[in-house]
Amino acid sequence: MTELIQYRIKGGSAAELARDIESAVAGGKLAAGERLPSIRALAGELELSPATVAAALSELRRRGVLVSEQRRGTRIAERPPIELARARLPVPSGARDLSLGNPDPALLPDLERALARAQIPVRLYGDPPALAELLEFARGQLRMDGLPGESMCIVSGALDGIERVLQAHTRPGDRIAVENPGYAAMFDLLRALGLLLEPVTVDDRGMLPGELDRALHRGASAVIITPRAQNPTGAALDPERARELRGVLAGHPQALLIEDDHLGPIAGSELHSTITERARWAATRSVSKAMGPDLRLAVLIGDAYTLARVQGRQQCGPGWVSHILQALVLELWRDPLVQEQMDSARRAYAERRLRLLACLRANGVAARGSSGLNVWVAVGDEAGALAALAQRGWVLAAGTPYRLAGAEPAIRVTTATLTEHEAEQLARDLAAVLAPGSARRSG
């Protein structure tokens, strides 16, 4: 019997084989996470040489369509960089969806009010790419957190800025030290750029310094650090851990350092940065979680050379982030009422997260969540736990997309909208599902 279970992979050359697998993924014929046969088995099935098959799979790994790990073989990436034909599975009727990482809509500022008050500029080709007032206000905000802001630009969200920084300094095949567990969308981006992920274990205080040092010694040319509200674990650097990481980075002065402060002022913890004077560095401050996911804007700071290259590439493409969007964000940022709302949101998110952690602890369930909008719960069997919880009316996020080799199975709970009653019930249900022998795979 062949190992090709559902879709029969085809191809008479490395290029044809790669194209067929990619097309099958796009059409939903090969599912995310589905394991492929071994190179030898696939070569025998297709009557190709193992070298030809290996070349095709290597190209798909370079583009982020496939991932390979020891003991897990080669499989379709959880979120390959392809527009998929499949729609997201619907949430069962009556179920509570805590899987998406969204902020609470009730805690977002009033965009209609801001639009009515904003001074919308008329900008033409050749005008400066960023509003001077926005840059100046952002610079003041960052300086209050101890971050330099001499070189700054506006990008279309944190990931857009990080992608541009990586394109300015890296090339396919470079190794990038990343948090493990870490942000799934970041993993997807790095794989799509052809970069190799070098996992660094994260505890409640962020990256482990010794592991980061080893990753850099293994050849990582860049490191991406989330200083607070780390996704998915909620880890946040404290002064001691930030100092230790700065010490490690000082021993690797040519490594590119990127900090991603994606949650900013609503993270629920102070910012302890790893940024120091070094040859290559960048940091992002996004507004999407605090002001609304549709506000695709982030401030990017960094060394002068990095920012010059980023802005140069930006000018070759979109040119600038919409000045209408920039004016709206500036109005929101400067509005005292919005600042009060964000302070309230920060307190509410912290209260909801800490409440669930307390309920889980009371029910004997170990979980992590030092800051941010999520709680990370260790499980023995992700699929079984998720299926059992879905039967009880909870839709949670599988940990698999967030985990690299070495990270234990877990599930992510977004606590941004979780009520007190829901926290108590979810904790009881998690305890019941995670009790020995309770979680079962559904048929």
Image (spheres, rainbow, N blue to C red):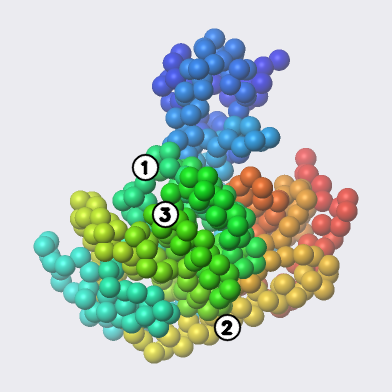
Residue shown at 86% from the left, 57% from the top = 435
The quarter of the picture where residue 396 lies is bottom right
Tag 2 near tag 1, CB within 8 Å? no
Residue type of the residue flagged with mark 3 = Ala
Residue type of the residue flagged with mark 1 = Arg
Query: Could you say which is closer to the camera, residue 82 or residue 208?
Result: 208
Q: Quadrant of the C terminus?
A: top right
- Bin the neighbour count of mark 2 within 10 Å (Cα to Cα): few under 14, some 14-19, many 20 and up: some
From the image, tell me which residue sits under label 2: 347
Query: Could you say which is closer to the camera, residue 170 or residue 436?
Result: 170
Q: SS class of the residue under badge 2?
A: helix
From the image, tell me which residue sits under label 1: 171
The quarter of the picture where residue 347 lies is bottom right
Tag 3 near tag 2, CB within 8 Å? no
Q: SS class of the residue under badge 3?
A: loop
Q: Looking at the picture, does residue 313 appear above or below residue 11?
A: below
Q: Looking at the picture, does residue 137 appear above or below residue 237?
A: below
Residue shown at 31% from the left, 64% from the top = 303
Query: Could you say which is closer to the camera, residue 52 or residue 240?
Result: 240
First in sequence: mark 3 vs mark 2: 3
Residue shown at 57% from the left, 51% from the top = 214
Picture coordinates of residue 326, whole percent (x, y):
28, 71
Residue shown at 39% from the left, 90% from the top = 336
Q: Looking at the picture, does residue 245 appear above or below residue 220?
A: below
Left/right of residue 426 with respect to residue 112 in the rendered view: right
Picture coordinates of residue 440, whole percent (x, y):
82, 47
First in sequence: mark 1 vs mark 3: 1
State how far apart marks 2 and 1 are (Cα).
41 Å
